[in-house]
Amino acid sequence: MIENMDIGIYTWFGFRYPFNEIIKLINNAGFQSVMTWWGDEYKEINGSKEMEPEIIRNNGLILEIMFKNVRH
């Protein structure tokens, strides 16, 4: 059963790399899916958060979860 399981990782490593580079590193490491944060905190490095799902898909990964800050 385990051999059929996708393995994922969170996109935040603790280092400030451009988002597309992080996704390439994750893909090259053999992961199949990612979880990520939907925010503007690193917009100067990552660019528009709206492009992140496309970057993930274009690198052959599955976007499992996007976390977002919600204010009540």
Image (cartoon, helix red, strand yellow):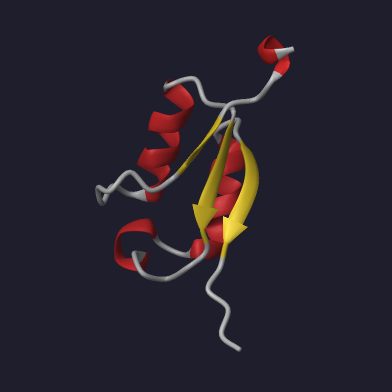
Q: As drawn, is 12 to the left or to the right of 6?
A: left
Task: Locate the C terminus and report the quarter of the image it occupies.
Answer: bottom right
Residue 46 occupies quadrant = bottom left
Give the residue drawn at x 44%, y 45%: 11
| Residue at (60% x, 51% y) in the render | 53
Which of the two residues, 71 or 55, is positioned nearer the viewer here? 71
**Is the residue 13 above or below the residue 71 in the image?**
above
Q: Report whether 17 appears left or right of 50.
A: left
- 60 vs 21: above or below: above
Residue at 34% in and 64% down:
42
| Figure quadrant of the N terminus | top right
Image coordinates of residue 63 in percent, x first then y, are 63, 44
Q: How many marks?
A: 0
Q: Position of residue 61 (x, y in %)?
A: 60, 33
Image location of residue 32, percent across then percent down: 59, 27
Q: Residue furthest left?
A: 15
Q: Residue at x 68, y 14 (%)?
A: 2
Q: Is residue 25 left or right of residue 68?
A: left
Q: Nearer the viewer, residue 27 or 11?
A: 11
Please tell me whether residue 68 is drawn above or below residue 19 in the rendered image: below
Please tell me which residue lies in front, 46 or 39. 39
Task: Indicate whether 3 appears above or below 35.
Answer: above
- In the displayed orientation, state which residue is furthest to the front: 1
Q: Quadrant of residue 43?
A: bottom left
